[in-house]
Image (cartoon, rainbow, N blue to C red):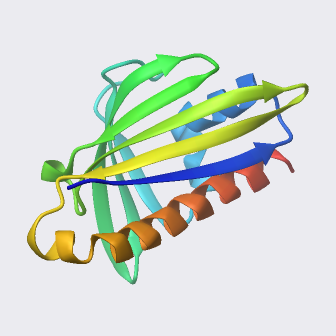
Amino acid sequence: MSIHFELKRSIEVSAQNAYKALIDLDSAKDWMNGLVGIEREDSGPLKVGSQWKETRKMFGKEASEHFEVVELDEPNKIMLRCDGTKGTTGKGEFTYIIVPAGDASEVTLLGEIKGLTGFSKLFGKIMAGAFKKACAKDLDALINYLEK
């Protein structure tokens, strides 16, 4: 079983600047809520195959997720895979689509949570709603950071 969600936001920066901000893991500490740290498995600019572990404090506890870059199409698309076997929650894919709109842009996040079974399958829709809210807070925090 998998659950899909979609978020759309307008942002008053160019598509190129939105793209760069989404792949700049070093600046995440400046805007990402609850971030404890990011541990890269490689160095240099993100590229297809780049991986990292992202640790956040959520509900008073630390939770880590393992991400991998699946696709980069600058400045239009970023696709990430979350490997639940190495993290706290589960498997998933997150695709950012960035569409220019003059000096601004529209960012769409397409999310998919995969491999829900047992208890998580039963409460999947509730979990998906909470996860979508968390992703929306992150996207809004990034937009606030960029539009300062």
Please say whether residue 67 is visible from this viewpoint: yes
Q: Is residue 116 left or right of residue 21?
A: left
Residue nearer the viewer, 6 or 130: 6
How far from the left and from the top, in percent, is residue 4? 40, 52
Residue drawn 72% across and 49% down? 9
Q: Residue at x 59, y 52 (%)?
A: 7
Residue 80 drawn at (x, y percent): 39, 35
Residue positioned 68% across, 58% down in the render: 141
Tell me which residue sits at (77%, 55%) in the image.
144
Q: Where is the N terminus found, in terms of image quarters?
A: bottom left
> Up-down: is 134 above or below 90?
below
Where residue 145 appears, x then y in whole percent? 75, 51
Which of the 4 image quadrants contains residue 77?
top right
Residue farthest right in this picture: 103
Q: Is residue 104 above or below residue 75?
A: below
Total number of numbered labels?
0
